[in-house]
Amino acid sequence: MAKAQDIDVAASEPFRQAGARVVRVRAGELFEYGDGVLDTRDIERVHDMRVASRRLRAVLEIFAPCFPQAEFKGVLRDVKQLADALGERRDPDVHIDALQAFSKALLAANKPGVARLVEDMRARQSRGNELLAAALERARERGLHERLLALADEAEAQPE
Amino acid sequence: MKARRVKGLDPDGTLADNAERIVRVRLDELCSFMPTAGDPDEIGALHDMRIAAKRLRYVLEVTGPCFGDYAKTATKHVKELQDLLGEIHDCDVQIPETVAFAERLQSADAAALREAAGAADDLDPTLLKQAPHAREHAGLVALQVHLRARRLLLFDRFLELWDDYERKGFRARLEYAVGERSDDHEAQRPLASGAP
């Protein structure tokens, strides 16, 4: 399960300085979880990356005034798109997991209906995986990680 | 749900002063959904409250160490609330999905039985056994019952949890805590952010 890295903060430090540091760490976490995320046999990987994307999006929104707005808007949009794609994969993962657990407690006569729904969810999971693969490729092509780091640099470079 | 705008943020101001403004707005946003979200039929309000809890949680996770001790307790409370609202939301998504799926199979079976009846004057009930999804309907009904019952149970837990927070003065204590500043001379450790 995704545990966010602890980030030291000081109450009196400049907002922009804290924002730059926090965004660098959260951006690093997002891409760190990217390895093996398309493997549907291990649903925790996509879960970890999705949580990391939520945390990154949240800190971008918290520290929004610290960043040059034109670049910021494009980066935030790309992070949201990646987060949405992670959701498209994660939602059926969660549903399948819950259905399989539920099915274990069922009478034999009730199992086929739930199995049929799992089958339907597997197809949705597969479509979600294709969307996620495309989103990951797009993030790579558009240099999302590098743009996030550049955004943090620019926040810090502003005169205090 | 679009987040309420936080006015007066200053990139050159201190982290704590800016974070205080954000937390106050996000806390007010969260609390504003009650009592509306306390109505089990207000699914939209409950969903928005979950998003508001998520926003408050993440700002507290990052900036909580700037404030008084209660900020740490509040972060745990908000996480617990967000998790519970997330479970309820899962039911709110899965119930209509399951209903729609069951209806698709029923419609398919009805069409197949009509086809099988051919030119008969009326439908022979014994044809039901031949329906392509005959063995699947019962499990889907059981699932719908389970999801609806689980939603009722989780919603009761949500009401109890919120009552508990109100009794403990969650809002007032967090508002007080964000007015305090932690000692800048000490090493400031962030909150354990733990599970998502």
Image: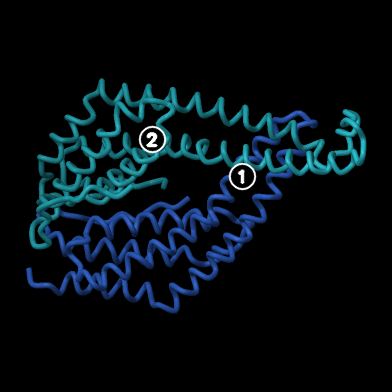
Chain colours: A blue, B cyan
Q: Residue at x 32, y 29 (%)?
A: B36
Question: How many numbered circles does the render carry?
Answer: 2
Q: State the image quarter where residue A5 is shown.
A: bottom left
The residue lying at 29 percent from left, 29 percent from top is B34
Chain ID for label 2? B
Name the image quarter holding residue B182.
Answer: top left
Depth check: A4 or A38 in front? A38
Mark 2, secondary structure of its residue: helix
**Dot 2 amino acid type:** Leu
Neighbor class of circle 1 (other Cα within 10 Å; few <14, some 14-19, many 20+) is few
Compared with B189, B74 (above or below) is: above
As drawn, A46 above or below B29? below
Q: Amino acid at mark 1?
A: Asp
The residues bearing labels 2 and 1 have C-alpha atoms spaced at a distance of 24 Å
Query: Are dots 2 and 1 on a single chain?
Result: no
Q: Which residue is mark 1?
A: A97
**Which residue position is annotated with label 2?**
B46
The chain letter under disc 1 is: A
Observer-nearest residue: A7 or B154? Answer: B154
Give coordinates of residue A106: x percent, y percent: 72, 30
What label sits on residue A146 in the rendered view?
none
In the image, taking residue A114 as reference, residue B89 lies left or right, namely left
Taking the spot 68% from the left edge, 50% from the top edge, the residue there is: A120
Instruction: Residue A37 in the image: state x and y as whole percent.
Output: 54, 63
Label 2 CA crowd tier, 10 Å (few <14, some 14–19, many 20+): many
Measured along the vertical axis of the image, is residue A61 above or below residue A114?
below
